Amino acid sequence: MSKISIAWVEDSPETKDLAISFLRRYESEKRVSFDAHFFVSAEDFLSHYENQYQAVFMDVLLGEGKLDGMSAAAKLREIDDEVPLLFVTNMAKLVYKGYEVKAFDYILKPVTYPQFVMKMDRLMHEIVKGKAKNVIISTRSGMAVIDVNKLVYIEVVSHKITYHSLNGVLEVNDTLKNCLKTFAPYHFMQCNKCYLINPAFVKRIENYNLYIGDEVLLISHPRKKEFTEQFMDYVLGKGGEK
């Protein structure tokens, strides 16, 4: 199962421990999985930030002499204007100030689990609906989040679907028909009856060989003309933005 990567900036050990326990409980109840990275200072967080997180939790009042959460949020927005940002604070009056840095939501201290669940459910919906181009699929063990931007191609054999992504390989039971419906909006193309490919990863096409990522896939004879036309439309921008 692909993990949802989050950053949490918090200098209180007690709040960190509580956050970890809430995340683990939420994982168990909702069948999701988090890759949580904790930072004790905004400076440390910002120095490591490379648009790698799907959500950021920020304590507003950090330790004396450190960059406060609101100032850190402003610097974050200079780097990333889209990542959902949730402030964790005991100062309700700061809610309105958060609009200046496009805060997604607030979690008020002392944090309770019912409040945490309500905020996380809203965040999960935001992650899933597509700003980061994520797709949720059903697996035997629950739900998995697939980052479309890292999905190289989809392999279809009977009713078994294998997702080949930069994050690894995931196998599920599904049908080609469902995959076509799910990934058509992201311009995935069918080069033969076994493969749906992400054109963003295509390196070159030579005869019936498709060089994609680190692999070579076969373009079937019946699909060669249509696939080549679709790919050229994509390259020339006629297929719309990815």
Image (tube, helix red, strand yellow):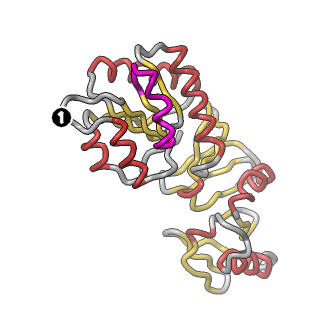
- Residue 6 in percent (x, y) is at 43, 38
Q: Is residue 78 above or below residue 196?
A: above
Between residues 199 and 96, which one lies in front from this camera angle? Answer: 96
Number of other residues with Cα within 10 Å of mark 1, as a class: few under 14, some 14 to 19, many 20 or more: few
Instruction: Kindly indicate the quadrant of the structure image that contains residue 24.
Output: top left
- Residue 27 in percent (x, y) is at 51, 25
- Residue 199 in percent (x, y) is at 63, 69
Q: Is residue 231 above or below residue 162?
A: below
Of all residues, the one furthest to the bottom in this rendering is 207
Q: Amino acid at mark 1?
A: Gly
Instruction: Kindly indicate the quadrant of the structure image that contains residue 71.
Output: top left
Q: Is residue 143 magenta?
A: no
Quarter holding the C terminus? bottom right
Prevalent SS, magenta region: helix
Between residues 195 and 236, which one lies in front from this camera angle? Answer: 236
Name the residue located 69 percent from the left edge and 74 percent from the top edge: 234
Q: Is residue 219 above or below residue 30?
A: below
Element under label 1? loop
Q: Which residue is mark 1?
A: 65
Name the residue located 56 percent from the left edge and 33 percent from the top edge: 123
Residue bounds of the magenta highlight: 88-102
Residue 217 in the figure: left or right of residue 91 = right
- Residue 177 in percent (x, y) is at 81, 52
Between residues 182 and 138, which one lies in front from this camera angle? Answer: 182
Name the residue located 74 percent from the left edge and 47 percent from the top edge: 159
